[in-house]
Image (spheres, grey):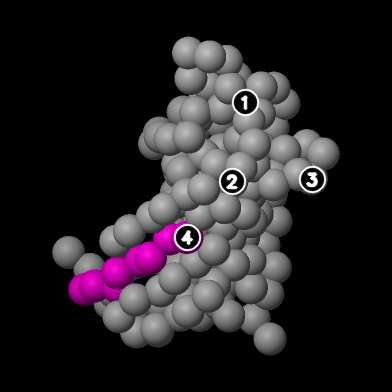
Amino acid sequence: MAIWTQTPNLEHLAKASENTAVSYMGIEYLEIGDDYVKGRMPVDERTVQPFGILHGGASVLLAETLGSMAANCCLKDPETVAVGLDINANHIRPVTKGWVYGAAKPIHIGSATQVWEIRLENEEGKTTCISRLTMAVTKRP
C-alpha cells in the first residue's frame, strides 16, 4: 500500500529542485515506489573533498534531499510543510568516481514528526552511507 497523500512524480520533484543546491550538485530523481524515493548524485568536482573522495556533506545533502522530498508527499494536513529537524550519517566506504545512489524509506510518519532512513550505495551496490533524517511537520509560512 502506498504511503503518499500527494502522489509524487519525477517531473514535479525535478521542477521543485531547479536552481537550488540539489540541481547544482547534479542530483537526479530516478524512481518512486509505494514507500520510497530513489535518486543519484555524481561523484565529481562538485561533490568531492580535497582528497578526491565523496564529501560527507555531499552525501548528507543527497540523503536530506531524498528524505525531505518524500516526507512532503506524506503530509496528512495540506496546510503543513515538513522541514529538516535532525540528520545523522555514518560514512561506510569512500567513493572516488561514478555515481552514488540513494533510497529514502520511512521509519515513522506522524502528524508532528517523520523519521526517514536513507541508504546510499556506489555503482556496485555497496553501502557507502546510512543516514537517518527527522523531519518536523509545521504550518506553512
Q: Which residues are magenta?
A: 132-139
Q: Which residue is disc 4 drawn over?
A: 132
Nearest the camera: 58 or 82?
A: 58
Q: Main secondary structure of the magenta part?
A: strand
Graded by Cα atoms within 10 Å as few (under 14), some (14 to 19) or many (20 or more), the crowding at tag 3 reads few
* Looking at the image, residue 69 lies above or below residue 43: below
Instruction: Find residue 128 and report its horizontal and vertical position in percent.
Output: 64, 42
Residues under numbered marks 2 and 1 in contact, where contact means CB atoms less than 8 Å apart: no
Residue at the spot 64% in from the left edge and 81% down from the top edge = 2
Element class at badge 1: loop
Instruction: State the quadrant of the N terminus.
Output: bottom right
Pinpoint residue 87: horizontal percent, then vertical percent: 38, 55
Q: Nearer the viewer, residue 90 or 101?
A: 90
Q: Whole-Å distance between the Cαs marked 3 and 4?
A: 19 Å
Q: Secondary structure at mark 2?
A: strand
Q: Is residue 135 visible?
A: yes
Q: Identify the disc placed on residue 129.
A: 2
Label 2 to label 1: alpha-carbon separation? 14 Å
Which numbered tag is attached to residue 73? none
Q: Secondary structure at mark 4?
A: strand
Residue at image mark 1: 43
Q: Amino acid at mark 2?
A: Cys
Label 2: few (<14), some or many (≥20) within 10 Å? many
Query: Is residue 66 visible from the viewing direction of this image?
Result: no
Residue tagged by mark 3?
125
Amino acid carrying mark 1 in the image: Val
Going from N to C along the chain, the mark reached first, 3 or 1, is: 1
